[in-house]
Image (cartoon, grey):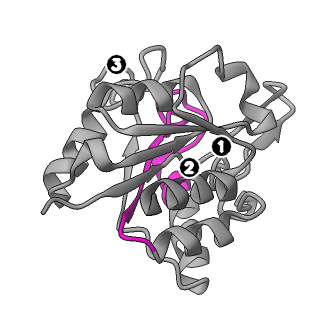
């Protein structure tokens, strides 16, 4: 039988965005020392880890394309996140990142692609990699693009209402809404037990 997954967006769901004075906006961390997990993220991941799902992170990371940082900076943030989760004995099966942006300035990463959410390529790739049943899988995200991405492949969706991503929510019709990732995890667990 095919496996089920919980796809998790990273920034605004698991990781706190960082306020940038230059852009006057909350953006992903660009240095390892900026990394902070969202409240109750560890508790949520522990609960999901105990269920019959594999955990996968699927995230747009366009700061290299926008020349806001180097790829090595993003790598250090990723390693810090992995280390923090491992210290909590949490296993994320795999991280799928899209580094592209259609309006970027870096020649290697600035283009329209199929992997940037709301494109569904990363979920389709994960489905092949892990023999997933996408219709029995879930996406937990904080933006319309997360919800649209999952809807394209038939996965169930939960929209987390992180305060710093409100400008990216314009009425996507998620199956469920949650205040944070722990509440989202509880929805997944209740629905799977029903």
In the rendered image, the quadrant that contains the C terminus is: bottom left
In depth, the one of 187 and 67 nearer the eye is 187
Report the mark closest to the observer, 1 or 3. Answer: 1
Q: In the structure shown, which secondary structural element does the residue marked by tag 3 occupy?
A: loop
Mark 1, secondary structure of its residue: loop
Label 1 or label 2, whichever comes before in sequence order: 2
The residue that label 2 is drawn on is: 10
Question: Is 129 on the left-hand or right-hand side of 123?
Answer: left
Q: Earlier in the sequence, mark 3 or mark 2?
A: 2
Picture residue at 58% right of the left edge, 41% below the top:
69
**Quadrant of the image occupied by residue 51:** bottom left
Disc 3 vs disc 2: which is toward the camera? 2
Residue ID at (54%, 63%): 76
Out of 12 and 18, give the one closest to the viewer: 12
Give the residues drawn in magenta, as a range: 51-75
Q: Are marks 1 and 2 in contact (CB under 8 Å)?
A: yes
The answer to if 181 sits in the magenta stretch is no
* Image coords of residue 156 (percent x, y): 41, 39
Label 1 vs label 2, nearer the camera = 2
Tell which circle, 1 or 3, labels the residue nearer the N-terminal end. 1
Front residue of this view, candidates 80 and 58: 58
Q: Position of residue 145 (x, y in %)?
A: 49, 25
Badge number at residue 28: 1
10 Å crowding of disc 1: few (<14), some (14-19), many (20+): many
Q: Is residue 67 magenta?
A: yes
Q: Label 3 neighbourhood size at 10 Å, few (<14), some (14-19), many (20+)?
A: some
Left or right: residue 49 versus residue 141 is: left
> Residue 56 in the image: x percent, y percent?
39, 57
Distance CA(mark 3)–CA(mark 2): 22 Å
Provide the residue designation for mark 3: 111
* Residue 6 visible in the shown view: yes
């Amino acid at each position: 039988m095919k496996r089920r997954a919980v796809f998790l967006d990273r920034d605004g769901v698991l990781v706190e965005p960082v306020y940038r004075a230059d852009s006057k906006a909350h953006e992903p961390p660009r240095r390892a020392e900026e990394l902070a997990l969202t409240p109750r993220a560890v508790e949520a991941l522990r609960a999901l880890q105990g269920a019959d799902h594999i955990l996968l992170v699927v995230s747009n990371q366009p700061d290299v394309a926008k020349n806001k940082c180097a790829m090595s900076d993003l790598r250090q943030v990723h390693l810090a996140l992995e280390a923090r989760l491992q210290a909590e004995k949490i296993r994320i099966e795999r991280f799928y990142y899209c580094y592209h942006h259609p309006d970027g300035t870096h020649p290697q990463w600035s283009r329209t692609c199929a992997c940037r959410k709301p494109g569904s390529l990363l979920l389709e790739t994960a489905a092949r990699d892990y023999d997933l049943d996408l219709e029995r899988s879930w996406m937990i995200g904080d933006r319309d693009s997360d919800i649209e991405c999952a809807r394209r492949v038939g996965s169930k969706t939960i929209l987390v209402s992180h305060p710093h991503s409100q400008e990216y929510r314009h009425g996507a019709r998620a199956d469920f809404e949650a205040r944070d990732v722990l509440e989202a995890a509880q929805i997944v667990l209740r629905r799977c037990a029903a």
